[in-house]
Image: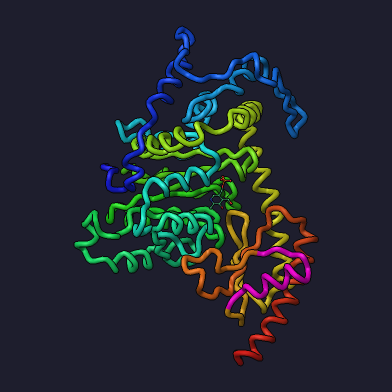
Amino acid sequence: MAYRRFLSAVGRRRQRPYLRRQTEEVQSDQAVIPLNAGLAHPALFPYRTATLRLQDGRQVELGEEIMQEVQQYSNTTGYPPFRDWCKNFILEHHSPPCWGRGENATDVIVTNGAAEAAFKVLEMCLETDDTIIVQNPTYASAIDLVQALGAKPVGVPGDGRGLSPLHLRETLSKWTPDEVKDPNSDFPKLMYLVPTGGNPTGENMTLERKQEIYAIAKEFDLLILEDDPYYFVQYTDSRVPSFLSIDTDGRVMRADSFSKTVSPGLRLGILSGPAPLVDKIVAHIGSTQEHSSNLSQVALLMALEAWGQDGFQEHVKKIQSVYKEQRDAMQSSAEKWLSGLAEWDLPEAGIYFWIRIKDVQDSRKIVEEVRKHYQIGVSPGFAFSTKPSDPSPFVRVSFSYVAPDTIDFAFQKLADVIRETQKTERREYGT
Ligand SMILES: Cc1ncc(COP(=O)(O)O)c(C=O)c1O
């Protein structure tokens, strides 16, 4: 594939900084005297060793050598042993068809979470007046960034299984066949998708759905940005394969996250995709933040190595089981308090319920009232919309953090506020 047409003017100009590449090369060769780089003197580092105690009681020791390495500058693509772990992880879980396939082969780098991975891709591709296909509603931060870049999110509705291919075709047919082929038209270059446990809708795409969407992306030559932090938070017996795993062309950029499987505060994720595009992101990271925190990468690597492959799978199972219990608790409370007042689907993945409140035009007042009277935070639907000025009767609530009895209390109060608001709207609008 040729990638130039997918890049913004800034994206095209980005090059991996010469000096950073030279520093990384020199640093990796012990035989070279590194007068080229502004490395810190190791005698001045404050930390000598560290011990990390894992939840299961085991201890992981970071000796003097590794602590010195951690406190020094490292590679933009990731702390090498951790990046190797990430490469194996992507290969094992997604077997990308383009792996090892020439100059467009799948490459893998470490990022500060899925957010950095996904959002640097948006920045690489979009500029003023460009358009991008997103499911409407979708992850609010993605919409915010697209709008800040001056680009236009083109919302396509979902149908309970994520973005609907039918509506996608309908949306794309608004451009004439000539515009579709014209690189200077505003025909979309890419699609931003949250395929697993969609945020905010909780929808989980099936493999057939992903194949249908991939076929459309192929037909119209679109890139797919797969933002997939909830991949390991699926409550079904087997995980639905990713877009990356069916990407025979090299048109998928995938963002993984360790926030949902390990810890959001470590700020670690993975970006995988065709090497020429990943290279542009390395150039961006290299000239802005240099690289992700070594200490985070090493701390995570140590835990992952202590667990081993089986231990990681066990850990993921535990996460699924804890979040599934939380989800089921929220479902019980929703049935108990919100039946008749609202509608929702039980999410098969992710950490959110997307609740449509009946007989109200917009959820904003409800969100304000539960906060004001009961100190309860819920997210209003408009915030996830490509047209936030339109009213939305939805609210998004998360079941990942709050204890079941507190969820129950919150839903009881939410129900009271919904009833009051419905009454007021009936009086005002006669609905
Ligand atoms: C769809 C989506 N993308 C990205 C993120 C951010 O993930 P990370 O913490 O890995 O940056 C989130 C977190 O809520 C999310 O829901």
Residues in magenta?
362-378
Which residue is at the far top?
31
Please name whichever residue, 122 or 232, is drawn nearer the observer in this view of the structure: 122
Q: Which residue is depicted at the point 40% across and 40% down?
A: 273
- Give the quadrant of residue 61: top right
Measured along the vertical axis of the image, is residue 172 above or below residue 217? below
Q: Nearer the viewer, residue 178 or 404?
A: 178
Residue 282 x, y percent position in the rendering = 43, 34
Q: Quadrant of the C terminus?
A: bottom right
Q: Is residue 209 left or right of residue 418?
A: left
State whether residue 31 is above or below residue 177.
above
**From where the camera sits, is residue 251 visible?**
yes
Q: Tell me the quadrant of the picture where the N terminus can be found.
A: top left
Give how far across and how far down residue 275 sits, in percent: 36, 35
Give the residue at x 64% y 89%. 426
Residue 417 in picture, x, y percent from top left: 73, 76
Which residue is at a point 67% across and 74% down the rendered structure image? 366
Question: Residue 212, can we see it?
Answer: no
